[in-house]
């Protein structure tokens, strides 16, 4: 199990002691596009602080997104996310899912994109939100934000290949 570093833990403790609502989401965020920015802005609007779990390079490879992914390394993806006004912290995780990170952060709100369903309880379903059971159990909220139509990294890569 990965442990958060002590500086991250202290920042989270400070935010919580100040009564700030912590929102968590996660993803690859490989080639940042308008869909990502809109999604992250919407997630941030659900609380005071947004923490983003970023899949490590090795975990991206296990997600089946293709042999060329990630395009950008985990450090670069983290840096770009933290430069966004809506993101307070980005944390790289290398596990297959962000479950352990969610358990450590204990966000007030867990957010995922439109292909997920907060009512799905079967952890084997592709629309199941990892961590939703744990967050709901301690009184947190689970939210799903709609996708911005026509914007996805996969679509961007396909479009760029078709212009060759």
Image (cartoon, helix red, strand yellow):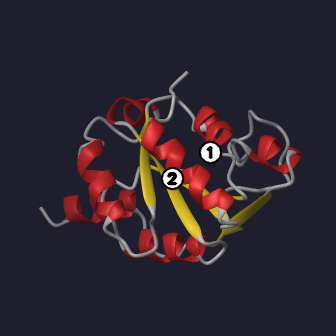
Element at label 2: helix
Q: What is the x, y in percent for residue 88?
A: 45, 64
Image vertical order of residue 106 relative to residue 97, above or below: below
Image vertical order of residue 121 relative to residue 84, above or below: above
Q: Residue furthest top?
A: 1
- Of tags 2 and 1, the one toward the viewer is 2
Which residue occupies 29% across, 35% down? 67
Q: Residues within 10 Å of mark 1 (few under 14, many from 20)?
A: some
Which residue occupies 21% across, 58% down? 161
The residue that label 2 is drawn on is: 11
Quarter of the image holding residue 81? bottom left
The residue that label 1 is drawn on is: 105
> How far apart are the alpha carbons under marks 2 and 1?
11 Å
Q: Quadrant of the N terminus?
A: top right
Question: Of residues 59 and 41, which is closer to you in this image?
Answer: 41
Residue 111 in view:
no
């Amino acid at each position: 199990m990965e442990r958060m570093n002590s500086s991250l833990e202290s920042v989270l403790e400070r935010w919580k002691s100040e009564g700030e609502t912590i929102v968590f989401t996660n993803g690859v965020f490989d080639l940042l596009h308008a869909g990502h920015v809109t999604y992250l802005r919407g997630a941030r609007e659900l609380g005071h602080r947004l923490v983003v779990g970023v899949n490590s390079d090795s975990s991206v490879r296990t997600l089946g997104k293709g042999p060329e992914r990630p395009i950008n390394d985990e450090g670069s993806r983290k840096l770009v996310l933290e430069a966004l006004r809506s993101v307070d912290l980005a944390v790289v995780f290398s596990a297959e899912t962000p479950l352990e990170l969610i358990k450590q952060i204990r966000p007030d709100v867990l957010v995922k994109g439109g292909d997920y369903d907060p009512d799905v309880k079967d952890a084997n379903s592709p629309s199941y939100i990892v961590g939703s059971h744990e967050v709901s159990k301690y009184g947190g909220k689970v939210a799903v934000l709609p996708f911005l139509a026509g914007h996805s990294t996969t679509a961007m890569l396909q479009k760029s290949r078709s212009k060759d």
